Amino acid sequence: MNDDYLWDKTGAPDPDVERLERLLGGLAHNKPMRPAATTRLIRPWPVGLAAAAVIALTAGLAWWQESTQRAGWDYKLSVQGVVADARTLRVGDWLHTGANELAKLEVASIGHVDVSGNTRLRITNTGQREHRLELERGKIHAFITAPPRLFFVNTPSAVAADLGCSYDLHVDDNGDGFLEVTLGWVELALAGRRSIVPSGAQCETRKHVGPGTPHYASATAAFRAALSRIDFGAAQAGDLDVLLRDARARDTLTLWNLLFRLTPDERGRVFDRMLDFGSPPEGVSRDAVRRGDAHALDSWKEQLNDLW
Amino acid sequence: MEACLPMMDAAVMAMPAESRDGWVEAARRGDRSAFGQLYARYARMVHGILLARVPAGDADDLVQDVFVAALRRLHTLRDSGAFGSWLAQLTRNLAIDYHRRVRRSEELPADLASTDAERVEAAEVLAVIRSLPDAYRETLILRLVEGLSGPEISARTGLTPASVRVNLCRGMKILREKLGLPQGTSGQEEQ
């Protein structure tokens, strides 16, 4: 079997390609052209009609804004496996699950959030431009199928922005957090610190500090311990050496993100080590990396994505 | 490795250029049926490009908007033979405008799948494809969602057959990795 089936549907069918075709085929375009829509868009509206539409739109917007403030999400609470009737969590109301309780929140029409026991959260906003939760403590699993930056979770140690589309987020009693992404990307940010965490990676967050550096659980224990010290102000001499020594190709995720938090000389050392995993693209020089040239770093990231 | 070596294919010529050029010229003169022919020929390409960039629930409506915009701007197209690539770029531009204009929630079509599990899996796979670089995600969506063959993608978008074939192979290779599928021979790249 070669790639003929993928290319022009000839030859022996590739089972994986066939399965993806069946799975995704329901999304294919199958709508005829709408003449009415064409006519409506081509002909300009009469001035009076347009003015009436503006008035109606303004009134509708005011109603929508008011109704959004009262809006909420449906959820089901289960106690020791017994599922209760659906309820609605209104914007501003707290949901506090007990030790033996789980809740499943339907996030408007864009996904759901599974809430573990001993968790306290509330909706702070829900509308067309954003849906936002405040997670005070506890653990959630979010599964979101929406464009990037439509679903956010505020925690005491970072704001998590969904870039699509599945992750676990835990906040302990001190307000520190831990993120593990299972699909897509999540951005963590607080007070000028920012980390973008891809599928399979994880990241710690600290109250009053913000997110640490994304890394993989499969990195060595020494690597993860040294990274945590560097991230949260307890760096010891030799910690960067440990990272450079233990880094695998996949850990270029961590090294690349660290470039934004190191001195120029340290960035130069990281650059030298990353050369072991492949040549950077044209324009990404040691000098550019030492300077922290944003364009060069972005360009390098595009190439490194294949390793992560 | 032969698998992904770029090569020309006679099927690229599946749509006679004279027909396409004739439809473009006729549509330019106001012939709605000719424009309907162009819609029938290019709607899946437009939908696929949109699906790589906007919520699935909005892609259908935006297809209509793209063709309305194309009808309005058809007089600016100098080379009828470049209609496909011109329409593809117009579609990408309107997708950017969409994101500037509004961010809306994504809903999967009600008829997408018969079970929740399939619906969720389709959404997951689509999300993974969308996370790929532009060239790969667009080509893979046209192939796996819209059902166009590589030669058809090339003929409609104006990309060379070699580019489409490489994008399909590399994109599928990365997609397999991200979905945890074993690498088939169709995922092998040119050496």
Image (spheres, coloured by chain):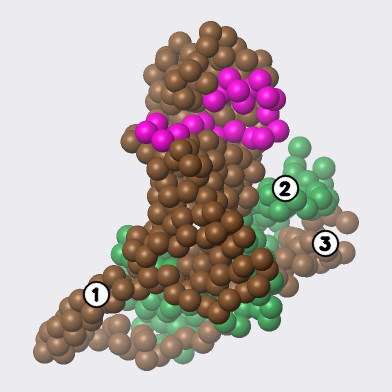
Chain colours: A brown, B green
SS state under label 3? loop
**Callout 2: chain:** B
Q: Position of residue B65 (x, y in %)?
A: 38, 76
Alpha carbons under labels 3 and 2: distance apart: 16 Å
Q: Is residue B139 visible?
A: no
- Highlighted range, magenta: A206-228
Residue kind at label 2, given as amino acid type: Glu
Given residues B149 and A252, the one toward you in this image is: A252
Q: Position of residue A214 (x, y in %)?
A: 55, 35
Q: Residue at x 68, y 29 (%)?
A: A219
Residue hosting label 2? B177
Number of residues whose C-alpha sits closer than 10 Å to that of mark 3, classed few (under 14), some (14–19) or many (20 or more):
some
Q: Residue at x 20, y 76 (%)?
A: A62
Q: Residue at x 54, y 37 (%)?
A: A203
Given residues A203 and A14, the one toward you in this image is: A203
Q: Nearer the viewer, mark 3 or mark 2?
A: 2
Residue hosting label 3? A14
Number of residues whose C-alpha sits closer than 10 Å to that of mark 2, classed few (under 14), some (14–19) or many (20 or more):
some
Alpha carbons under labels 3 and 1: distance apart: 53 Å
Residue kind at label 3, given as amino acid type: Asp
Given residues B187 and A180, the one toward you in this image is: A180
The answer to whether residue A234 is magenta is: no
Alpha carbons under labels 1 and 2: distance apart: 46 Å
Q: Residue at x 62, y 78 (%)?
A: B112
The residue most toward the top is A237
Say left or right for B72 vs A258.
Answer: left
